[in-house]
Image (cartoon, grey):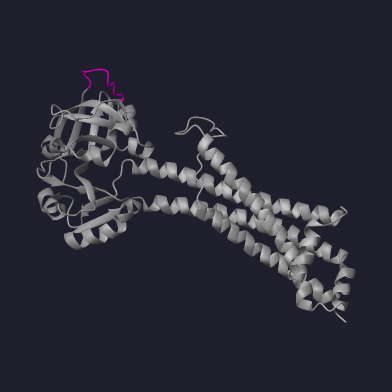
Amino acid sequence: MNFPYFIAKRYSFSSKRTNIVNIISYISLLGIAIGTAALVIVLSVFNGFEQIVLEMYNSFDPHLKVYSSQSKTFTTNDVKDKILDIEEIENYSFTLTERVLMEHKNNEVIVELKGVDDSFDEIVEIDSLLKLGGYFYDDLYKENDVLVLGAGVMNNLSVDLNNIFSKIVVTVPEKESKYIRDSSDIERSVFTPIGMFSVQSEYDNKYSVSPLKRVQKLLDREGEASSLEILLKNEKDMDELKLKLQQILGEDFIIKTRIEQHQFLYKLLNSEKLAVFIILTFILIIASFNIISSLSMLMIDKKNDITTFWKLGSNRKQIINIFFMKGFLGVLIGSLIGLSIGVLFSLLQQHFGLIPMQGNFVVNFYPVKLDMIDVIIVELIVIIIGLITSYFPSKVLTDRFLRP
């Protein structure tokens, strides 16, 4: 057996008496375990919240979104002919969006009116978002003046879906009008609300949905769309297909992946996670100072052993390695205990919901998503900290004790 490892293991596990040095060693091990477990749990909670937030946004957004770089809209047939033979595309939907003024009784709101075609409910799982009323699946509604309102829009307009006489007046500028001077510069239409959807507050207060052909007629843009929304067979193909579509459609179009559609949100979530990770890592570094103090006290306590090893023929490197391995074993054991606690707690919370959320939230329990990449990163960080905090006191004190 390797001599330094044998002695280090004896110092770690074979002590016959409990003294202050042993107690401090156990405290340092406990500190590493708690710090490691906290890192794993907090990162898993951040992953859980990130997953929920992104799922809420992504439930209303496609894998790829295509816009015109030259104008507000484009002709649907020109684009449709170019993408029909692309195998990676599961489905697609043309949409036409315009800011409009909606009025109901004495309430007014500015809303993004989104005209959607028959394939939109394949791109977006509208049934899971629909909270009240219905959607315009039936042929009766497909070209008629009907609206599915965002929850915030419906609330701001004080619309009662149970009242069949509820009507919403939609006002938009005339297509050719540069300025609104009188009633001839605006177009007004009356729509009937038939349903209410809810994604999250930003979308709920912003969007209302109506049949594409009716919005095209309202805006005098028959055969036009403002965007093409694409659902892929495999979400992992987003970046690859974006490049492929860019080559097919050319510079006249801008293509954004799901991440690029909410680039600020992704950066914000990652920045918050990184900030918390750095803070907890610093706390773990501070906790690791216990390793330095406990190792230093052990070496002072074993000063006579160090002299004996030296006289028996051990070289300086072997003596350094004895105490280095002793300190590193404590860090390794503490980190493995911490990882076990963190992973076990995260899995239990993820699958059984041990800790409930307080107040009204979209989930009943704290969301947790365990990512093994995070676990590996945490363990690597702890190992690096352990290598540094174990080596320096071992080398410095050994050199001091063996100084002639």
Is residue 293 visible from the viewing direction of this image? no
Magenta-colored stretch includes residue 366: no
18 on left or right of 361 = right
Q: Nearer the viewer, residue 378 or 6?
A: 6
Q: Quadrant of the C terminus?
A: bottom right
Q: Residue at 23%, 25% (x, y): give it.
A: 194
Q: Which residues are magenta?
A: 158-166
Q: Residue at 63%, 46% (x, y): give it.
A: 341
Is residue 83 visible from the viewing direction of this image? yes
- Secondary structure mostly seen in magenta is loop
87 on left or right of 308 = left
Against 203, residue 239 (above or below) is: below
Against 148, residue 305 (above or below) is: below
Magenta-colored stretch includes residue 159: yes
- Residue 168 percent location from the top left of the image: 22, 27
Against 314, residue 376 (above or below) is: above
234 on left or right of 350 = left
Q: Residue at 86%, 77% (x, y): give it.
A: 312
In the picture, residue 395 is in which quadrant? bottom right
Q: Most extreme residue toward the front, as rendered?
A: 1
